[in-house]
Image (spheres, grey):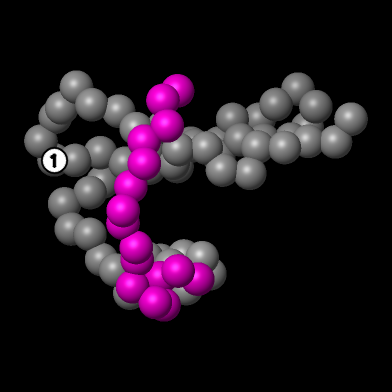
Amino acid sequence: MPFVSSDYSPPFLFKIGHFSTIYSGLVRKVNGIIQERERIHLPDGDFLDLDWSFAHRPTNKVIILLHGLEGKA
């Protein structure tokens, strides 16, 4: 994966990761998105939650965001 440099500097409060998360979840509203959650149960008793978001107008684009994939051996 190539490294892409950027000169972007977020506003002061958005430099704090917790604030960005709270803001986007509670304050920011996005209209026109259909969301569905799919739970996949795994053989070891654990599960994966997949959150699907769809726009009203179909596209051939996809974004995959992964967060917190870790485990203990």
Residue 6 falls left or right of residue 30: right
Residue 6 falls left or right of residue 33: right
Q: Nearer the viewer, residue 66 or 26?
A: 66
Q: Main secondary structure of the magenta part?
A: loop
Q: Which residue is tagged 1?
A: 56
Identity of the residue drawn at 52% across and 37% down = 66
Dividing the image into 4 quarters, which one contains the C terminus? Answer: top right
Q: Is residue 14 above or below residue 37?
A: below
Q: Is residue 9 above or below residue 6?
A: below
Residue 16 falls left or right of residue 28: right
Position of residue 58 measured from the top left corner of the image (x, y, whole percent):
14, 29
User: Within 10 angstroms of label 1, few (less than 14), some, or many (20 or more) residues?
Assistant: few
Asked if the stretch drawn in magenta spans residue 13, the answer is yes
Position of residue 22 measured from the top left corner of the image (x, y, whole percent):
46, 71
Q: Is residue 34 above or below residue 2?
A: below
Quadrant in which residue 44 is drawn: top right
Position of residue 71 measured from the top left corner of the image (x, y, whole percent):
78, 36
Residue 57 falls left or right of residue 1: left
Span highlighted in magenta in the image:
1-16
Q: Amino acid at mark 1?
A: His
Position of residue 59 measured from the top left corner of the image (x, y, whole percent):
15, 27
